Amino acid sequence: MATMLHRQIHNNLLKSEDYQSVDDLSRFVRLRNAHVAHRNTYADYQDRSRRTNLAELLHICHRLSRLLSIASSSLPDSPKSPDKDEPQVIPYPQHIRNWDDLPTLQETVWNFLGERSTFSNAHVFPSDFQCSLVEHSIHPICSSKDVYNFRHQTVHRFLHLIWSQLLCDETIITSCLREAYDCLADPCGIATSTLEFELQADSADCCVYLLADRHEFPIFFVQYISTQDLPTAQIRQQPTNLHFEKDVLNSGGTQTAFIAAVARAYAQMLSTGNRSCLLDNGESLVFLQADETRPDTLNVLKYIPADELGEDAEGDSDKTVVAQYLTFALLSLQATAPSQKWYDAAAKLPTCLLDSKGVRSQPDSTGYPHRSQDLGNIYAPIFVSAKTDRPFCTSKCLLSLSRDEEIDQKCPNARDHGDQYHEIEPAVLLNILYNQLARSDQPYAFRPIHLHGKHHHYLKGTIPGYGYTFLVKAVEQGHVEALENEFHFYERIPASQGFEIPICLGMIDLKACIGRSHTYYGKKCEKMLLLSCSGVSAAIVVDKGSIDHLTEDRKVLEMELKEIHELVEMGMRNLDLSWCNLVWNQQEERLVWINFLFWQE
């Protein structure tokens, strides 16, 4: 119809001499122009609003990543004072090695994602026009903060979109996110997780982590560095097979901004327990990972998109910057956390000095065995830790254990506890744990579940052979008194355990029993409480629209707690029942009060 109308107007215009007046001709000209404008606008709208699939989105992102421009002069990130440039004493790796198998690992992950047609082929991402609006927020790079801002516009925002679609595929969750999936009290929480990029204060370092419920799973951290401070040409020329002491620290060795950045990243890996890092100057990526069993070895792979890709990245979607970030995140999520033996060995590494000019030897640095025969003693093969992918035992199960009652047959681990009654008692459970923790070759006796308080960390414990799986609350050095007060609180109200509050199976004192502390997240912990996992964050249930029901449940819980005479005797009349101190117990269908660190005897 539109074509016929256009043809009719055109034909009439050709016979303009037939019109009785100029006004008639002008009217038809305006009509024709309006029609043509409408047709062009509608075609432009259709083009702008057409959603893209994953491959198309990655091509658009690649085009955006090529818009990076470098300012002619660099602006300092912050004014340097003599105090700020004081050299830091940091450990260094004995060996820096080329990470040869990383490209193969990334390709395997990408091929797996490509086979998930629902994820890769669905047109669910923004249109080319919508993505192109990002161009207005891209500015020339003068500092490392500018590199972060550039990646935030051209990488982070698109990874958020991709991640949300990736979680729509259950196979991807159970295959690529198995480690995180097994840690959650409510595994369904992984389907609503988000990928977070948190810029650290006073730096251009960015922590990348998976947020699921209240769990924060560290994935990797990024050091954004301006190209003025770390030129791509230097990255391209830098060898990545080095003996640090011989090739870097000794006179005449390699001294570059690249080595300084790698050394700084390595020190952060050891201090946080996050073995994966990415150096990014906006033009190139450098992937780093501390070895799983030998902390003295650092694996490094350089990736420069300009050397690998053309202008449109046709057929090479997996090599674009966004795809490289995505596959590195999935691989890092599958990496195992450092073991206690790993931390023990890392504590014996030699140290060097790091400042704005690079790294240099530290006089009289000691503590690391340089003879090859000593290395074998430190890095003897580690034993595989107890299987910790079991679900948590139910509160009723651990309650029956503490009271010597019949096993809760609804517990997912019930068949390993015994026939009708528990084969062991809490005192025996504690002895088994002490023996497990005392082994010098034992990796993590408790598995981190990446749930933290201000000075404490929650872990997942399992008793081999008996299947008991429980929550462990480990407190950092300097904050032991608060945990002891909490333990005494549990001892004072045993009848309420398993109902209004979690069940406490006991407290472990590592220093007293095995003579050493354990390290989690880079922090030393000496004392731990063994608790039931009483549920999931109440906020999850609130988000599902049951705020009115939960508000009533909270009132009921408050009334029950106020009727406990032991609490009255302790002077606890004003109870903090804010949502952050409550969890929802699905089995009992009730709220449970947690977090008593505020209480003092």
Image (spheres, rainbow, N blue to C red):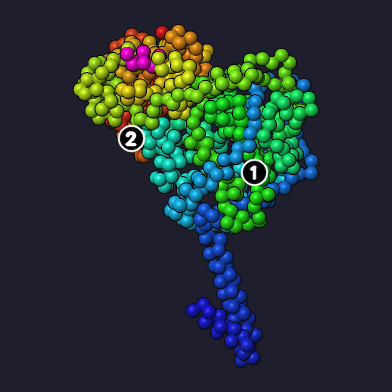
Is residue 390 rendered to the left or right of residue 298?
left
Q: Residues within 10 Å of mark 1 (few under 14, many from 20)?
A: some
Query: Callout 1, which amino acid?
Result: Tyr
Observer-nearest of 490 and 286: 286
* Mark 2 residue element: helix
Identify the residue shown where x is 58% and y is 30%.
Answer: 290
Can you tell which of label 2 and label 1 is closer to the viewer?
1
Measured from the top left, where is residue 235 in percent x and y? 71, 39
Identify the residue shown where x is 55% and y is 18%.
Answer: 377
Identify the residue shown where x is 50% and y is 12%.
Answer: 516
User: Is the stretch drawn in magenta largely helix, strand or loop?
Assistant: helix
Q: Can see residue 99?
A: yes
Is residue 483 rendered to the left or right of residue 494?
right
- Compared with 601, 358 (above or below) is below
Q: Which residues are magenta?
A: 428-434
* Mark 1 residue element: strand
Tags 2 and 1 in contact by the CB under 8 Å rule?
no
Observer-nearest of 376 and 363: 376
Q: Is residue 430 magenta?
A: yes
Identify the residue shown where x is 61% and y is 42%.
Answer: 152
Q: Can see residue 501?
A: no
Measured from the top left, where is residue 196 in percent x and y? 53, 38
Q: Is residue 91 magenta?
A: no
Q: Earlier in the sequence, mark 2 or mark 1?
A: 1
Residue that badge 2 annotates: 548
Q: Residue 174's image quarter?
A: top left
User: Which residue in the rendered view is the most extreme toward the front?
Assistant: 373
Query: Callout 2, which amino acid?
Result: Asp
Measured from the top left, where is residue 423 in percent x and y? 25, 18
Residue that badge 1 annotates: 303
